[in-house]
Image (cartoon, helix red, strand yellow):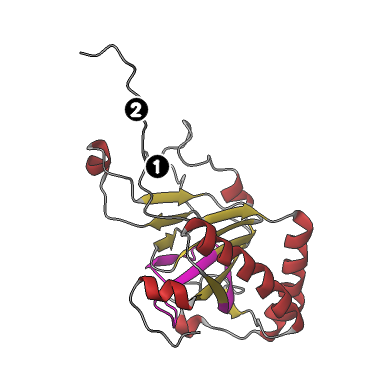
Amino acid sequence: MSDKKINLNTVSINHLHMITGMLPENAVEEINKHIDDVIIPTQDSVSYNLVGQINQGKKSSQLDFDLKTPYGQQFKGMLDSFATALLQQGYKREGKADAVECWTVHSYAGDYNPFHSHGTATPAGLSCILYLKVPDCIKEKPTPNNSDWNINHASGDCDGFTQLIYNTATSYDVYSLHASGQEMIKPEVGKIYIFPKWVNHQVYPFFGEGERRTLSANFNVYYSENENKKFGVVSDWL
């Protein structure tokens, strides 16, 4: 054997990219004020088009967040910039993201969202979740993957949490060196997640006082002509 040094590197092959970040407290307060003053009084329900089982409390609702109003346009600009950053920096694609629908989810004890994914008019699309209010009964729970987090013994440690499921790997698959296909998310006020529309997700019910408030949006993705050519696509999306 040669005594020359052999350089080895560990290489990761990424199959999923997300954007996550924390909005400042004053931004969350501003968004919540708009929801309290405009969205809730308008009561424009979109539950007919959503799978969320949000019906256990008198205030349980899923409401349209109009992106065409002056405030909606300002908010949409922020969302579009975040989602376009994921498209360009995470996936290295030439194009832009365009938020086309947005809604708020006002959940109370017993409400939940079953396993589902989202849809958009364009073949590629993005979705987001923004946490705006989190009840104390969820805040006090351990953070997933910490040593004190354990969903055995009927602990309730996942109550009110969001679960992302992006492949079918089991625990045995992970033990066999397959990539994990799940992510459990503990809601935090101000935390935003943006991910591809095909990522399946669900929300577990919680049991306690208070409102769990989230905002979601879907984004059409418009590739540049150059990007479409890379895939042999002639598109009139732009």
Does dot 2 land on a helix, a strand or a loop?
loop
Q: Residue furthest bottom?
A: 236
On whether residue 117 falls in the magenta region, the answer is yes
Which residue type does callout 1 highlight? Ile
In the picture, residue 120 is in which quadrant? bottom left
On whether residue 23 falls in the magenta region, the answer is no
Q: Residue at x 48, y 60 (%)?
A: 92
In the image, residue 200 lies at what x, y percent?
Answer: 38, 63
Please tell me which of labels 2 and 1 falls first in the chain. 2
Could you say which is closer to the camera, residue 109 or residue 14? 14
* Left or right position of 45 against 176: right
Q: Residue at x 48, y 52 (%)?
A: 159
In the image, residue 199 lies at what x, y percent?
Answer: 39, 63
In the picture, residue 209 is in which quadrant? bottom right
Label disc, if present, on residue 151 of the rendered structure:
1
As drawn, 140 above or below 124: above
Label disc, if present, on residue 8 of the rendered structure:
2
Q: Residue at x 73, y 75 (%)?
A: 74
As drawn, 14 above or below 146: below
In the picture, residue 76 is in which quadrant? bottom right
Q: Residue at x 49, y 53 (%)?
A: 161
Q: Nearer the viewer, mark 2 or mark 1?
A: 2
Which residue type does callout 2 highlight? Leu
Could you say which is closer to the camera, residue 153 or residue 227? 227
* Image quarter hosting the N terminus: top left
As drawn, 63 above or below 199: below
In the image, residue 191 lies at what x, y percent?
Answer: 62, 55
Q: Which residues are magenta?
A: 99-128
As drawn, 62 above or below 143: below
